[in-house]
Image (cartoon, grey):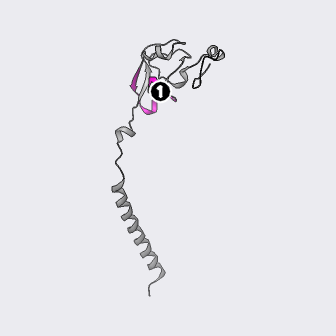
Amino acid sequence: MTSPRRWAAVVVVASALVLLAILGTRANETPEINRAACCDESPLVLVARVNIPAGTTAQEAAGSLELQKISRSAIELGALGSVEDIKGVTLEPIFFGQQITIDLFGCTEAKWARGECGGGYNNR
């Protein structure tokens, strides 16, 4: 007659073998991850090429912006990666080399009061 400890050991070993077999087959089914696409350590971020005064339209400012690779740890909260993401006017001066963030563009208080701004704008 077999002891309960021996049965427990057999069950543990058998369970481990089944688990390894399942994980081994699942590993072959898992698609490869494109590290360059998903985990790029330096994504492109919009940066000012020159100083841009407050009140500059998004369309005018777009010509003064460029995409630069910025390390993930240095990217500011709300940084943008496309000029298509900006609208309105610059709400404050933007300086050479400054990352372009969503809160730098919007609708001025005066235009907001006159009802000249639609939805999707920051306002000041």
Q: Is residue 3 above or below residue 83?
A: below
Which span is picked out in magenta? Answer: 66-84
Q: Nearer the viewer, residue 20 or 28?
A: 28
Residue at the spot 53% in from the left edge and 14% down from the top edge? 93
Q: In the drawing, does residue 113 fall left or right of residue 51?
A: right
Residue to which mark 1 is pinned: 80
SS under mark 1: loop
Q: Quadrant of residue 15?
A: bottom left
Q: State which quarter of the image contains the N terminus.
A: bottom left
Q: Can you name the residue that lies furthest to the bottom here?
A: 1
Q: State which quarter of the image contains the C terminus.
A: top right
How far across and down, in percent of the image, does residue 24 sit?
35, 60
How far across and down, in percent of the image, does residue 39 sit?
39, 39
Q: Is residue 31 above or below residue 9?
A: above
- The amino acid type found where label 1 is placed reads Leu
Residue at the spot 55% in from the left edge and 24% down from the top edge? 103
Q: Is residue 110 magenta?
A: no
Residue at the spot 47% in from the left edge and 20% down from the top edge? 98
Q: Residues within 10 Å of mark 1 (few under 14, many from 20)?
A: many
Q: In the drawing, does residue 32 fall left or right of residue 96?
A: left
**Callout count:** 1
Q: Nearer the viewer, residue 116 or 89?
A: 116
Q: Is residue 70 magenta?
A: yes
How far across and down, in percent of the image, does residue 97 sit?
44, 19
Q: Can you name the residue that lies furthest to the right here?
A: 113
Residue at the spot 45% in from the left edge and 33% down from the top edge? 73
Q: Is residue 117 above or below residue 19?
A: above
Q: Quadrant of residue 41?
A: top left
